[in-house]
Image (tube, grey):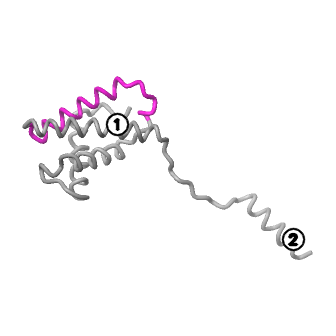
Amino acid sequence: MLKFVFVLILFIIFQLKPVIGLSFDTSDPSVSLLQNRISNNFSKKYCNAIQNGFSKDEAMKSAIIKTENIISFSYNPQKKWIEKSDLANQISLHVVNDCGLSFGLIGKEGVNYFKSYFLEIYEKTTPDKNFSR
């Protein structure tokens, strides 16, 4: 009888206050694919501009504006789920891998530098827009 009461009390406690579970942040694969396409597009535009003799700032502004125009006219409803920080990180990875060596950016330090540089120029270039919305 004592065992039954103890189990009943535990059951009631767990029903009133369930154990907190861990949830994983799983993103929609279509959002990841869109983010990958955007970062590939930006990387190509930025690396081409650098190879054509543009300064870092000119190449960055040009690539941001061209990529922003493509995103703005996109009818893909998934673009509203892209986080600016995640997109900036992926863009940085692509740029450093594609052409970072040509202007001295390698490894994690290069990615972190380019990400902060990208976000700084992005805020100055398009202060009223949000890259993914």
Query: In screen coordinates, is 69 left or right of 75?
Result: left
Determine the residue positioned at 84% across, 66% down: 8
Dot 1 corresponds to which residue?
A: 37
Query: In screen coordinates, is 29 left or right of 1?
Result: left
Q: Which residues are magenta?
A: 54-80
Figure quadrant of residue 23: bottom right
Q: Residue furthest front?
A: 98
- The secondary structure type at the circle numbered 1 is helix
90, 33: nearer the viewer: 33
The Cα atoms of the two marked residues, 1 and 2, are separated by 60 Å
Q: Position of residue 12 (x, y in %)?
A: 79, 62
Figure quadrant of residue 129: top left
Label annotation for residue 5: 2
Figure quadrant of residue 45: top left
Q: Is residue 55 magenta?
A: yes
Choose the circle earlier in sequence order: 1 or 2.
2
Q: Residue furthest left?
A: 53
